[in-house]
Image: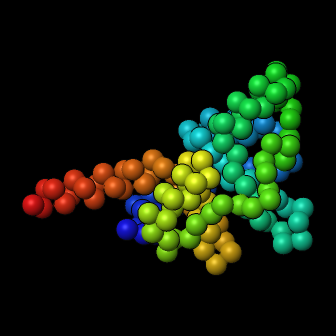
């Protein structure tokens, strides 16, 4: 099974946050969209509108632990490592994506095709797809 197989059944909505936004804004975006991760974009670089990282609920917790109530005013850029974005493509296998997630201790991966952000795939998406494939195989037998 490929990432693209899962994406065909998923809403193509990707919620992003800019590097210069605050943790408070990021948390409000996650709450408003009922999601646990945002793609971080950087508009300062010469490439322009570029995905550079992920901002998750874990980052919010880390900000509160380190900065207390002032965490809402901390910039996303202070918490996100932009050294190397871990991502996948729609042509990657689910096994490869699971390996990336396990090796990097992450639950969300941006899907980037031809240098364009097309979606985000989560461990939950993968688990649901595997469950569905398993159920349809067992029902066919």
Residue at figure coordinates x 73%, y 55% from the top left: 53
Viewer-nearest residue: 13 or 94: 94
The answer to whether any part of residue 8 appears in the image is no
Left or right side of 94 for 138: left
Classify residue 67 by image quadrant: top right
Q: Residue furthest left?
A: 141
Question: Which residue of the protein is positioned furthest toward the front in this rendering?
Answer: 103
Which residue sits furthest top? Answer: 69
Side of 76 relative to 35 (left or right): right
Q: At 83% from the left edge and 51% from the top edge, which residue is drawn? A: 19
- From the top left corner, tell me how far across and down residue 18 is, in percent: 80, 51
Image position of 105 with respect to 89: above or below: above
Q: Position of residue 7 (x, y in %)?
A: 46, 63
Instruction: Indicate left or right for 87 with 137 as reference.
Output: right
Using the image, determine if residue 73 lies above or below residue 14. Answer: above
Name which quarter of the figure residue 120 lies in: bottom right
Count the marks: how many? 0
Which residue appears at 69% of the width and 51% of the height?
Answer: 54
- The image's colouring method is rainbow
Judge whether 37 appears above or below 82 on screen: above
Whether residue 86 is visible: yes
Residue 30 in the image, given as x and y percentages of width and height: 64, 39
- Determine the residue positioned at 83% across, 68% down: 48
Residue 50 point in image, percent of width and height: 77, 65
Where's the N terminus, which quadrant? bottom left
Split into 4 quadrants, where in the image is the C terminus?
Answer: bottom left
Vertical order, 136 against 29 (above or below): below
């Amino acid at each position: 099974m490929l990432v693209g197989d899962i994406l065909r059944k998923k809403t193509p909505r990707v919620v992003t946050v800019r590097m210069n936004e605050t943790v408070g804004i990021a948390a409000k975006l996650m709450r408003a969209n009922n999601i646990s991760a945002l793609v971080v974009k950087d508009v300062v670089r010469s490439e322009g509108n570029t995905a550079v990282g992920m901002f998750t609920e874990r980052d919010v917790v880390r900000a509160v632990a380190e900065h207390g109530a002032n965490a809402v005013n901390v910039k996303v850029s202070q918490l996100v490592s932009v050294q190397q974005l871990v991502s996948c493509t729609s042509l990657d296998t689910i096994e490869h994506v699971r390996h990336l997630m396990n090796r990097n201790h992450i639950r969300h991966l941006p899907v980037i095709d031809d240098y364009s952000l097309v979606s985000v795939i989560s461990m939950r998406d993968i688990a649901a797809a595997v469950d569905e494939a398993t159920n349809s195989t067992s029902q066919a037998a």
